Image (spheres, rainbow, N blue to C red):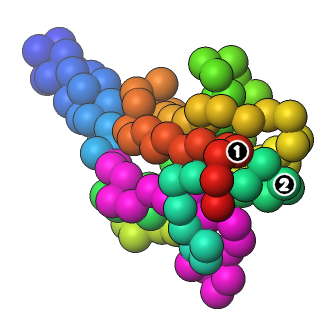
Amino acid sequence: MRRFISVICFILFFGLNNLSAQHIKVSNIQVATSIENRQPMGVDTSFAANVGRVFCFTRIKGATDTTQIAQVWYYKDQEKARIELDVRSNNWRTWSSKAILESWTGPWRVMVIDSNGNVLATTSFKIGGEQ
């Protein structure tokens, strides 16, 4: 009986932990000037200094249960924003936006991180320069 209880405890502990492990991935990541009908519009890798706001759109695949990701916005390697976003299905579109000051010219990037802190994707873009 003691062995049976040990086996059940083992299955519950490791089985439930494995059930909670999701293998989500980013199938699409784009930076855009707007989102319309859940689609990115004005997609580019370089934006004018007076853009005002940009959006990071991601499509997440593989979620088997509700989870979260974070989009972490960096300007010249300094974190400017961290936005937590829910993922609620196997094929989920989500996005965040960042207000951009005209003086924030130069390199930017957005990292998509899962709930365990793993980097799922990164995209880079530039603010300023010729349009």
**Which label number is shown at residue 50?**
2
Secondary structure mostly taken by the magenta-highlighted segment of the chain: strand
Q: Where is mark 1, residue-wise?
A: 128
> Compared to 57, does 107 lie above or below?
above
Q: Residue at x 56, y 36 (%)?
A: 109
> Compared to 113, does 79 lie above or below?
above
Regarding residue 57, the answer to whether it shows in the image is no
Coordinates of residue 117 in the picture (x, y in percent)? 47, 25
> Compared to 2, does 60 lie above or below?
below
Q: Residue furthest toward the front?
A: 130
Q: Residue at x 38, y 39 (%)?
A: 120
Q: Nearer the viewer, residue 6 or 117?
A: 117
- Helix, strand, or loop for circle 1? loop
For marks 2 and 1, give the CA distance: 8 Å
Q: Amino acid at mark 2?
A: Asn
Coordinates of residue 57 in the picture (x, y in percent)? 56, 61
Coordinates of residue 49 in the picture (x, y in percent)? 78, 48
Coordinates of residue 8 in the picture (x, y in percent)? 21, 28
Q: Earlier in the sequence, mark 2 or mark 1?
A: 2
Q: Quadrant of residue 106?
A: top right
Q: Amino acid at mark 1?
A: Gly
Give the residues drawn in magenta, as a range. 24-39
Q: Residue at x 68, y 28 (%)?
A: 75
**Residue 28 within the magenta-colored segment of the rendering:** yes
**Residue 103 within the magenta-colored segment of the rendering:** no
- Helix, strand, or loop for circle 2? loop
